[in-house]
Image (tube, grey):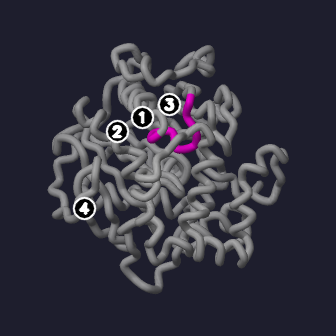
Amino acid sequence: MFSRRRLTQPMTATAASDATGLTGAGRRSAVTAATAAEPRAHHASRGLGPIRHLRTDLLDIAYHAVGPADGRPVLLLHGWPFSPVGSYAEVAPALARQGHRCYIPYLRGHGETRFRHPDTFRSGEQAALGADLIAFMDALRIPRALFAGYDWGGRAVDVAAALWPERCTGLVSVNGYLIQNLALAKNPLAPSLEEGYWYFFYFLTERGRQGLQRDREDLARVVWHRNSPQWRFTEAEFAQTAPLWTNPDYVDVVIHGYRHRLGAAPGDPRYADLEERLLEQPRISVPTVTLDGAADGVIPPTDGSGYAAHFTGPWTHHVVPGAGHNLPQEQPEAFTAAVLEADAMG
């Protein structure tokens, strides 16, 4: 395991871009290439190529695939309310140049990802997000992959890595251990932290639901500014993300996700067993790199020691200068380097 003396090591964008300068645990690689045929693509999307589609039992999942077909598989998961195209437009091609095959799915309720059946619970709970990732892998016949994500996507990869470690070769998780402890959902945090979670409480109300329904773009703009206060995104970048929020299930999934995490809404019964396991705060045993943005407006950066006990395999932590909550888009070189570091630790 990595020495805890490395916990506070900063990762700068320039230094991190040199993969040869990274250190990792000397365990043998367990990456398995995915060679399964993929469904036909349609529509063009700048940066990540066409949008592809596949079906699971519950979803028609939209996704991008970048890199050699026989490359080492990496799953890149986006957060809310951010775009997978914006977040990984630089990361995925950089990883592809290193021999990786990157898969970038759209979360349930986002973009062109659709529920297949009208009566399926529009859940945004953590177990659903993790299970979707595994179902996505199954549909592509990917036995094992490296998982990387932030925000909602970070929670999805943490859940999947904890509950299905045999499917995960390594992990990159922004803001550390993101599996929610629902047993403590009603316990208050420090006021300075609660302030950053203002939309959690807004979405508990019918006023908040109507506000999200009516002002999806305006609300997203506020979150972008507040959660990444140093990020100078362009209007073109913001406009590129707007179709993400037009999904007919977007409001239901988002509202349920935040209400469920605060104990204000029941979960989908199909995930009850998984949620029971997550109540135990399962440890993550796969090689892991955790990242904090030094300019994160919602979750202040730490040295990682507060969640160190949750990672029982090789693990290291970096604070990334100049990065806010949407770390892969704001500092893509640092995020890319973290993926390569986690891959080398296996």
Which element type, helix, strand or loop, lies under badge 2? loop
Question: Which one is earlier in the sequence, the residue at label 4 or at label 2?
Answer: 4
Occupied quadrant, residue 267: bottom right
Q: Position of residue 120 (x, y in %)?
A: 47, 80
Label 2: which residue?
Answer: 90
Whole-angstrom CA distance, mark 1 to mark 2, is: 6 Å
Question: Which one is earlier in the sequence, the residue at label 1 or at label 2?
Answer: 2
- Judge whether 276 appears above or below 121 on screen: above
Whole-angstrom CA distance, mark 3 to mark 1, is: 15 Å
Occupied quadrant, residue 284: top right
Q: Nearer the viewer, residue 287 or 237?
A: 237
- What residue is drawn where x is 35% and y is 20%? 19
The disc placed on residue 52 is: 4
Which element type, helix, strand or loop, lies under badge 3? strand
Label 3 Cα neighbours within 10 Å, binned few <14 / some 14-19 / many ≥20: many
- What residue is drawn where x is 15% and y is 56%? 37
Q: Position of residue 274 (x, y in %)?
A: 55, 61
Nearest to the eye among marks 3 and 2: give it.
2
Label 1 Cα neighbours within 10 Å, binned few <14 / some 14-19 / many ≥20: many
Which element type, helix, strand or loop, lies under badge 4? strand
Whether label 3 touches label 2, CB < 8 Å: no
Question: Which one is earlier in the sequence, the residue at label 4 or at label 1?
Answer: 4
The disc placed on residue 194 is: none
Label 1: which residue?
Answer: 332
